[in-house]
Image: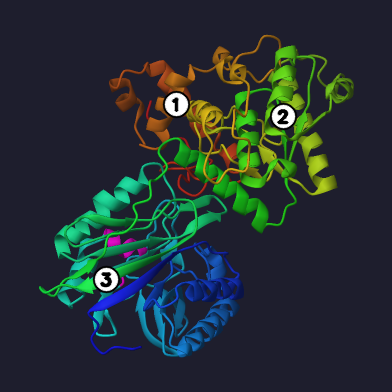
Amino acid sequence: MTQSFSTALTIALAQTTQAVGDLAGNADAMLRWREKAGQADLIVFPELQLIGYPPEDLVLKPALVERAGQELLRLADATKDGGPAMLVGTVIANRGILFNAVALLDEGEIKAVRLKRELPNYGTFDEKRLFAPGPLPDPIDFRGVKIGVPICEDIWYPFVCAHLASQGAEILLTPNGSPYEIDKDERRIAQVCAARVRETGLPVAYLNRIGGQDELAFDGASFVMNGDGVLVHQLADWREELRLTHWEKQEDGRWRCTPGALAPLAPYPEDVYSAMVVGLRDYVERNRFPGVVLGLSGGIDSALSAAVAVDALGADKVWCVMMPSRFTSEESLEDAEACARMLGVRLDTVAIEPAVGAFDTMLAEIFTERGRDITEENIQSRIRGVTLMAISNKFGHMLLTTGNKSEMSVGYATIYGDMAGGYSVLKDAYKTTVFDLSRWRNEAKPALGLGPDGPVMPERVITKPPTAELRENQKDEDSLPPYEVLDPILHGLVESELSVDELVARGFERDVVARIERLLYIAEYKRRQSPPGVKLGSRNFGRDRRYPITNAFRTS
């Protein structure tokens, strides 16, 4: 029943996924969530829930904007039944100008529209190329309650919420499309929302989407914080949830949310592993691949990639292939077989030596005056890439690459070889992170995992020295610093944009840092041709860090 001046509200927070571009499917899903909300007064959905986030240049298609308008009217019409009103994120066009917006739907009508003011244009975000900024938003009058709706980035800016408070807002509801990053939970809660609560004295309900979208994973982890700064609701991360929150107006005129469940959030490295699982799962399923195929070498990178794939898709959708050469050790063969057995996946063996011999013969005359070098090593890698792509083409499984961020940073990956594929779960994971994840997964299992409860790889895979096995007695540390040294240098160069001098001041050797910086820059052309992979840290290759390929600048 509609009230003129409410003193109590039930607000349903729909922490849910989206499918970019599937407007009818997203609208249908919202109607199902609305039905589950029962007698709630209002159900709130994440940012751009109707069209999916981030829409990138898809939103520039007039047909999509037109269809979004039609679906929004369909959703509004559904509210004629007297059930919960809906706060829906969508795109709004005004004289050809696009806005990131939320619409309040109630009693069969679009009652109000508010536009996003602050458009992020850094890292993974390109909203200024797509949308125009709206004016400072005024509160929405909903059943006598003034509700402020700062959309995602708006909550990060004090003046937006200060304006809402000055205009009489009583509750802040913030719909978000906030991608996962390591330690981002702390920033959202303590650095952002707690600060807005202190500044305005208003309670905040922070609602975030979940699911994977290309290189991004969204973790949910929505929450409610009362005006005294106390966290009173915490939704789980990495899974859909409908949380009914009950609000009452106090004698002093302030609104307070009744405390509810505080779900524990996944700690490191479980959160990183979960991001990989969600990102891969949604990428494979939404692009309608029957499964994935990958090379299983007996090393830690491919073992971890296989484990993530099994947890994401199930063992029946993961196909592993061992491709030994004359440099492959018996130990690697044993470890690959044991790993496949522990994961319960199919393992085939395709020896590459006949193809290696064929290439040696084919190129013998041209190479006659040159000795063997890295060229022959790369040929082996490219033969493996061709083999896996052939299986992918024949059976439809997406090829999963297995390289990590440390290798990608310094170019220790073969273009058109081990870089060939459709997706890379380790693309933003440094080698030291790979070790952390592997140790953790051998002892635990993510809540959303479909894989075995016990270990997923032999302990020897984790403890043995990493090697590509492309020549006799090869070890990664023959040509690279130990990963305990390399990864902090890379983190400084990539995530923190530190100079050689600054890293030397932190205790690293100048010659080592200068060499790593040079390798980082000259490998840019390779990274431009690498497959997408889930973003984990603050600066991934591709969406966050965009360097010119032709680049003469060095800090050494």
For this orientation, the residue located farthest to the left is 252
Query: Relative to 36, does residue 349 appear above or below in the rendering?
Result: above
Viewer-proximal residue among 343 and 62: 343
Residue under pointer 1: 487
Residue under pointer 3: 247
Say if mark 2 contacts mark 1, CB within 8 Å: no
Q: Is residue 420 left or right of residue 51?
A: right
Q: Amino acid at mark 1?
A: Asp
Q: Amino acid at mark 2?
A: Ala
Magenta residues (range): 149-156
Say if mark 3 contacts mark 1, CB within 8 Å: no
Q: Position of residue 146 (x, y in %)?
A: 24, 79
Mark 2 or 3 closer to N-term? 3
Query: Relative to 165, does residue 409 appear above or below in the rendering?
Result: above
Residue 154 on the magenta span = yes
Residue name at image x 34 percent, y 30 percent? 499
